[in-house]
Amino acid sequence: MHYEKLDDFPKDFLWGAASAAYQTEGAYDEDGKGPSIWDNYAHQAGNTFKNTTGDVAIDHYHHLEEDVALMGKLGLKAYRFSVSWSRVIPDGDGKVNSAGLAFYRRLIRLLHQNGVEPVLTIYHWDLPQALQDKFGGWESRRMVAAFHHYCEVLFKAFGDDIKYWVTVNEQNVFTSFGYRWAHHPPKVTDIKRMYAANHIVNLANADAINLFHQLVPNGLIGPSFGYGPTYPLTGDPADVLAAKNADEFNNAWWLDVYCRGHYPTFLLKQLQRMEIAPDITAADKLLLASAKPDFLGVNYYHGGTFKANRIDKPDEESSKDFSSTDPYLMQPQMEQAQSPEIPMFNAVENPYLPKTEWGWEVDPVGFRVALREIYEKYELPLFVTENGLGAADQVEDGQIHDSYRIDYLTDHLRTMKAAITDGVDLIGYCAWSFSDILSWLNGYRKRYGFVYIDRDDDGEHTLARIPKDSFYWYQHVIATNGQEIQAK
Ligand code: BG6
């Protein structure tokens, strides 16, 4: 679909950038902070790339003024950050650490002073270790009360200062990586346990949204979901059906619960037949149905491509082990009950799409497809809470010429503008990320930021902050409210 002229971005569009506590803050055991599951996981050799940890990360904790001043210089209208639960409540569900709250209060004040709207993510994967030890983490129903307590502390502390809140970040990623693929703590490989833990997160999310609406009536809240459109490999109806199944499996399983208040019929039935569905009580159903987000956060990197399942249409490719760090290509040879994908679809590579250095497909048109699909189906305002390019940037004479990142972002902003012209109601866009940060599994080499950080996998070096070419490009995009996206 082609337009002669695209609509302008809304006047109050939130041009932003995002980050997460574990990936930026450092100070992992300072000022009363308790350990998180990520602190412990990264401290065990062999769990992360070159055993990188967030102990120091980019030391945002001690560079707060400098970092927020740079956000002001960039002209950001919004900054999405997450709160470290164990910094605020070291044992997860007990006493509040006032020094922890003070850090975020200072951050929020500085953001306001610099004209940047804070967007607070409550949970970006760094669960207090104490809750893992006491309850077994997200597998316990006691987590709903613990999350409620944590949320209440945040809502009461910052409800007057922050309008936009994100409950949980990429629930689809942290539950599958933590409980199915064992790439994240607690390193479990059991899909039934994954669906059970995921159900508890759904309950905690719904309960938090209801609490928010009581305590922060003027605020807006929603989860951020890692969405990927699902393409059929060919026009063969069997491939089209496979792509539809994959959409249910990768997207609707979460989004239907968030936005419609119940699990999708098709997939729930399949999981029940395989005896891996979660236990859902009558009270659970009521809770899920009672909570409605005000907007939906969308994290977009890429989608997936699918062909008919390997039982109906076996072929040579079907026997390949697609294990990789790309969740869309993860299909190890497992028993059917452990691999519900097998009777439903087969994930394949898309022959039309180039890839990043880390093998992620680059698909700006898919961004428009994603925004359209989600908006049409769920009819909620959307907020792009992540999108960006990870690359191994190099410093040349003290500068970082990341034209490839500018190209990537230019293409995505254009298709986002097209989606707005299509009619999608979009609140804002947070690029991932403001500065280079720690990649959970790829160390410090995979850089996403507008600001280069002088540190790498081998050490902290000077931790100097250096704006990249993309910083100045984005500054101009924001200053023109997206009228001039093209690189200068
Ligand atoms: C998202 C996460 O899944 O992708 C971020 O919300 C993460 O925390 C980002 O950093 C990029 O992933 P990676 O693996 O390239 O660092």
Image (cartoon, helix red, strand yellow):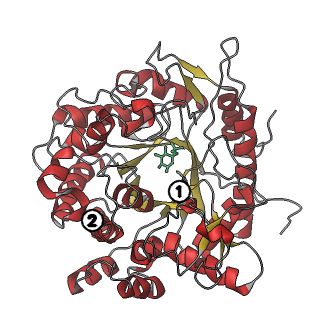
Q: Amino acid at mark 1?
A: Ser
Does label 1 point to a residue whose CB lies under 8 Å from ligand 1?
Answer: no
Residue at (60% x, 53% y) in the render: 301
In the image, taking residue 466 as reference, residue 26 lies left or right, namely left
Q: Residue 411 at what x, y percent from top left?
A: 75, 49
Instruction: Residue 484 in the image: state x and y as whole percent.
Output: 78, 42
Is residue 287 rendered to the left or right of residue 360? Answer: left
Callout 1: SS: loop
Q: Quadrant of the C terminus?
A: top right
The residue closer to the viewer here, 5 or 282, is 282
Please state which amino acid type lies under the numbered disc 2: Ala
Q: Earlier in the sequence, mark 2 or mark 1?
A: 2
The answer to whether 44 appears left or right of 312 in the picture is: left
- Quadrant including the N terminus: bottom right
Residue 480, visible in the rendered structure: yes
Give the percent coordinates (x, y) of residue 102.
24, 33
Judging depth in this view, the residue of 479 and 141 nearest the camera is 141
Tell me where residue 369 sits by quadrant.
bottom right
* Residue neighbourhood size for the residue with mark 2, other residues' Cα within 10 Å, grouped as few (<14), some (14–19), many (≥20): many
- As displayed, is residue 401 above or below residue 375? above
Q: Residue at x 10, y 44 (%)?
A: 95
CA gap, disc 2 to disc 1?
A: 31 Å
Looking at the picture, tell me which residue is in the foreground, 15 or 412: 412
Left or right: 315 with respect to 447? Answer: right
The answer to whether residue 148 is above or below residue 200 is above
Identify the residue at horizontal 45%, vertical 75% (top origin). 253
| Secondary structure found at label 2 | helix
Identify residue for label 2.
Answer: 204
The residue pinned by badge 1 equals 323
